């Protein structure tokens, strides 16, 4: 018989949450969408009809929603008698889910995909949310380990899993200081699908029972560009013509300045070169636009329906849910969060679009994926903005090398697919009779 899990770590954690409530509430007050009621943060959602069945998938933000898209589509296809509720913490994640819902609306299937904000992890809010939703299965994506939500699922008999389980060495060092709490939370999980052996080992060291962990690979390799993204890329390519185009996606403060400096140096060699700049967070769109203007560069903003002409130096991708399409319209793609201490973002998105992948040195969050691309000869790494400028000039001169990098990236993505099938098989074990 399994020993009962200690409750005191979660009690201390909950007490700390209550003490920090003013700070927590101030933070989530900004993460609001007009389409959602603020009461969702306290678990106040409509009860589903007694005859309805649903699956619940929680993703933190827009990046996780994008990475989970293959899983979302597969769950909807495999369980046609269930609706799928996707929760997010951020407003940008909510916007991305609404984009997926809108795409299904065109086929008359939108009602089976729903979105709510995840409740704050207070005990009462967690219990209320799980009781009202009453899911057949709860799936937490990557590192979303919420002790009270997991406890509420256990209390209501809801099986729980982590999909694409990821725990970077840096995150592990932080969580290790809270090992009693993490061990108690992870002990509530029925299954964890780790994306690598290193991630599995770090979860095990935090207290996740080894018998409930399987290494299935990264779901990010199962990303297939949808028709809408591919068509949008083709339209933009046609409008841009034959000029040199590179994209910098998911950029952060302190990084845009370096990218604009690299672009200015590139334009000494290629005066008509265009940078498609896509900041990670929408609340920064206006400030990044102002930064471009301060540097004296001509700017077009996608959100305003502006198209770059021959004089435009920077095209600001200030819309949501279009990063894949913008990657696909470029000759080269730089993935942000890697010239500053963020740890990088999803390197596989441009690779899946057949675009050569460039990155800075900060790759802690995607070290295993970076190594796989590196071994496949599909990753170009630069140390700083000066090295990035030199690399851009070299690659724009060498069409054959750009083609080789693009093909190598596609080959790496194709060779590592399969995590989705293994994840679905593991989830099926938690849904007997379905």
Image (cartoon, grey):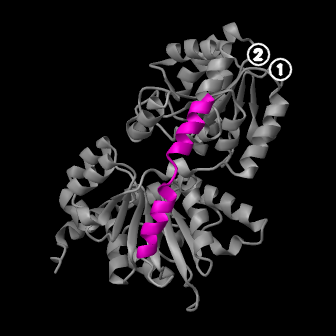
Residue stretch rendered in magenta on the structure: 406-429
The picture places residue 199, in percent across and down from the top left corner, at 32, 49
Look at the image and say whether residue 414 sits in the magenta stretch: yes
Q: Residue furthest bottom?
A: 50
Q: Earlier in the sequence, mark 2 or mark 1?
A: 2
The picture places residue 310, in percent across and down from the top left corner, at 83, 20
Residue 342 can be seen, yes or no = no
Residue that carries the numbered disc 2 in the rendered image: 272
In space, the residues marked 2 and 1 are separated at their CA atoms by 7 Å
Disc 1, SS: loop
- Is residue 162 rendered to the left or right of residue 336? left
Quarter containing the N terminus? bottom left
- Is residue 374 rendered to the left or right of residue 278? left
Q: Residue furthest top?
A: 268
- Is residue 157 rendered to the left or right of residue 65? left
Above-or-below relation of 302 to 99: above
Q: Quadrant of residue 5?
A: bottom left
- Is residue 38 rendered to the left or right of residue 402? left
Observer-nearest residue: 415 or 317?
415
Residue that carries the numbered disc 1 in the rendered image: 310
Observer-nearest residue: 133 or 14?
133
Which disc number belongs to residue 387? none
Majority SS type along the magenta span: helix
CB-based contact (under 8 Å), mark 2 and mark 1:
yes
Badge 1 local density, few (<14 within 10 Å), some, or many (20+)?
A: few
Residue shown at 55%/61% (left/top)?
A: 71
The picture places residue 361, in percent across and down from the top left corner, at 42, 26
The picture places residue 115, in percent across and down from the top left corner, at 59, 68
Observer-nearest residue: 378 or 165?
378
């Amino acid at each position: 018989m399994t020993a009962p899990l200690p409750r005191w770590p979660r009690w201390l954690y909950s007490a700390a949450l209550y003490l920090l409530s003013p700070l927590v509430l101030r933070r989530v007050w900004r993460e609001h969408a007009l389409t959602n009621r603020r009461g969702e943060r306290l678990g106040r959602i409509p009860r589903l009809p007694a005859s309805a069945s649903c699956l619940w998938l929680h993703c933190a933000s827009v990046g996780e929603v994008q990475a989970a898209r293959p899983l979302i589509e597969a769950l909807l296809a495999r369980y046609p008698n269930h609706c799928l509720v996707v929760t997010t913490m951020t407003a940008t994640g909510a916007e991305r889910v609404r984009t997926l819902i809108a795409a299904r609306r065109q086929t008359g299937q939108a009602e089976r995909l729903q979105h709510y904000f995840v409740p704050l992890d207070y005990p009462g809010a967690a219990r209320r949310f799980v009781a009202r939703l009453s899911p057949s299965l709860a799936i937490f994506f990557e590192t979303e380990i919420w002790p009270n939500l997991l406890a509420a699922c256990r209390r209501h008999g809801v099986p729980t899993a982590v999909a694409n389980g990821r725990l970077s060495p840096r995150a592990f060092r932080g969580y290790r200081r809270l090992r009693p709490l993490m061990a108690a939370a992870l002990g509530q999980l029925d299954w964890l699908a780790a994306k690598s052996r290193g991630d599995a080992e770090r979860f095990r060291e935090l207290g996740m029972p080894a018998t409930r962990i399987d290494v299935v690979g990264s779901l990010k390799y199962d990303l297939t560009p949808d028709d809408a993204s591919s068509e949008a890329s083709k339209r933009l390519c046609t409008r841009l013509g034959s000029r040199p185009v590179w994209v910098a996606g998911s950029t952060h403060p302190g990084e845009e300045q370096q990218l604009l400096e690299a672009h200015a140096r590139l334009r000494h060699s290629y005066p008509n070169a265009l940078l498609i700049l896509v900041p990670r967070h929408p609340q920064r769109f206006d400030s990044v636009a102002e930064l471009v203007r301060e540097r004296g560069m001509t700017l077009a903003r996608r959100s305003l329906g502006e198209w770059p002409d021959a004089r435009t130096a920077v095209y600001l991708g200030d819309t949501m849910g279009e990063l894949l399409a913008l990657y696909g319209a470029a000759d080269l793609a730089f993935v942000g969060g890697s010239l500053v201490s963020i740890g990088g973002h999803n390197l596989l998105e441009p690779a899946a679009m057949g675009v050569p992948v460039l990155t800075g040195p900060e790759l802690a969050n995607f070290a295993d994926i970076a190594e796989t691309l590196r071994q496949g000869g599909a990753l170009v790494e630069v140390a700083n903005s000066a090295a990035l400028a030199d690399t851009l000039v070299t690659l724009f001169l060498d069409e054959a090398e750009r083609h080789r990098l693009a093909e190598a990236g596609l080959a790496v993505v194709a060779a590592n697919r399969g995590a989705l099938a293994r994840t679905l098989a593991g989830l099926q074990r938690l849904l007997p009779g379905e």
